[in-house]
Image (cartoon, helix red, strand yellow):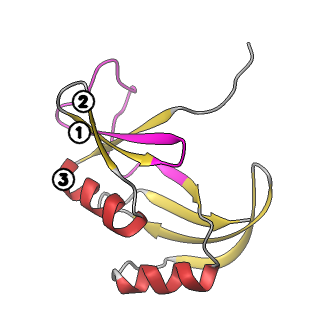
Amino acid sequence: MNVREIDHLVLTVADIEKSLRFYHEVFDMPILTFDDDRKAVLCGKQKINFQLSNHPHNPVATYPTPGSADLCIVVKDKMPEVINHLKSYYVDIIEGPVQKTGAHGKLTSVYVRDPDGNLIEISNY
């Protein structure tokens, strides 16, 4: 098997509109509609799909639960700009900036939570 990349991931959420608004406004991720009524945001070359905890899209993970994800997004912005941007949207930084190791080397990261409590690491190389 020759794996090339991750195409998408699915976040289970309590309120899709609230999640769309957060990811679109805070991270400037374009909103997508697919399969007639499903919603996602574009994250670089990948997308993040959203599903409701009480109405998941089959097949589904064994325990689709809001707030159980932990993901890292890489940004081009310098960390002081990221921090100022997050503050302008009243998004609490729960940790950072800290040094971490990503898939391609050393990262500088800050951590926030989305409306469902998912841990979002915002990083740059």
28 vs 66, nearest the viewer: 28
Task: For label 1, count other residues whose C-alpha is less than 10 Å away and answer few (under 14), some (14-19) or many (20+).
Answer: some
Residue farthest top in this picture: 1
The C terminus: image quadrant: bottom right
Q: Which residue is mark 3?
A: 17
Task: For label 3, count other residues whose C-alpha is less than 10 Å away and answer few (under 14), some (14-19) or many (20+).
Answer: few
Q: Which residue is mark 1?
A: 53
Q: Residue at x 49, y 77 (%)?
A: 94
| Residue 15 in view, yes or no | no
Compared with 101, 93 (above or below) is below
Q: Residue at x 21, y 58 (%)?
A: 18
71 vs 54, nearest the viewer: 71
Q: Quadrant of residue 56?
A: top left
Please give left or right for residue 36 compared with residue 47 in the image: left
Res. 56 mark: 2
Q: Is residue 51 inside the magenta stretch?
A: yes
Give percent across and percent down for residue 79: 62, 79
| Residue 125 in view, yes or no | yes
- The reply to whether dot 1 and dot 2 touch (C-beta < 8 Å) is yes
Element at label 1: loop
Give the residues in magenta: 43-71
Q: Is residue 38 inside the magenta stretch?
A: no
Q: Quadrant of residue 114?
A: bottom left
The CA distance from mark 3 to mark 2 is 15 Å
Q: Compare marks 3 and 1 and give the one earlier in the sequence.
A: 3
Q: Residue at x 38, y 78 (%)?
A: 91
Give percent across and percent down for residue 75: 59, 64
The CA distance from mark 1 to mark 2 is 6 Å
